[in-house]
Amino acid sequence: MTIPPAYLVGAGGIAGAILRHLVGLAVADDRLPLGTLTVNVVGSFALGLFTFLSLGDDVLLLLGTGACGSFTTFSSFAVDTVELWDADRPRVAAGYAVANIVGALLAIGIAYVVTL
């Protein structure tokens, strides 16, 4: 039985969106958007892991494009950064932006090392 690619992406997307919401609730902090930072770093690790393990096209559609795609959030990261800047917290905004980018890249690097 072959599952259409859109169904795989959609099913993964549902799971990723629900997990993203739950993680956001679990790490909520009024001072810093830790939910977005957490899902971006963890999601980057997961996507790197799934990719480097060469799990196959269908699994990558389900877990990579679907689940990781809806779990991580570049748009929220961008909005959060601007909101921190607009709140006269430019250093926090810059640190937050660096933490997202560097954290995601390090997570992908760790995933690569783990799969060697």
Image: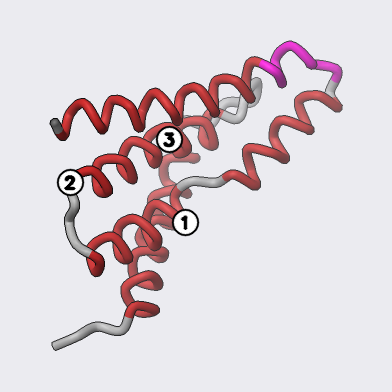
Q: Was residue 93 drawn as part of the magenta stretch in this picture?
A: yes
Q: Which residue is mark 1?
A: 70
**Split into 4 quadrants, where in the image is the N terminus?**
bottom left
Q: Identify the mark nearer the N-term, 3 or 2.
A: 3
Q: Quick check: marks 3 and 2 in contact, CB under 8 Å?
A: no
Q: Quick check: marks 3 and 1 in contact, CB under 8 Å?
A: no
Q: Determine whether the residue tagged by mark 1 lies in a helix, strand or loop.
A: helix
Residue 71 % position (x, y): 44, 50
Residue 9 % position (x, y): 38, 70
Q: CA distance from mark 3 to mark 1?
A: 17 Å
The mark lying in front, picked from 2 and 1, is 2
Q: Quick check: marks 2 and 1 in contact, CB under 8 Å?
A: no
| Above or below: residue 88 compared with residue 76 | above
> Which residue is pictured at 17% across the width and 29% down the height?
114
Residue 112 % position (x, y): 25, 32
Left/right of residue 62 with respect to residue 71 in the rendered view:
left
The mark lying in front, picked from 3 and 1, is 1
The mark lying in front, picked from 3 and 2, is 2
Q: Which residue is mark 2?
A: 53
How many numbered discs sit on the rendered protein? Answer: 3
Q: Identify the mark nearer the N-term, 3 or 1.
A: 3
Residue type (three-letter) at the residue carrying disc 1: Ser
Left/right of residue 102 with respect to residue 83 in the rendered view:
left
Find the magenta span and give its range: 88-94
> Which residue is pictured at 39% across the width and 38% down the height?
44
* The image quarter in which residue 60 lies: bottom left
Outermost bottom residue: 1
Main SS, magenta region, reads helix
Q: Which residue is mark 3?
A: 26
* The image quarter in which residue 84 lies: top right
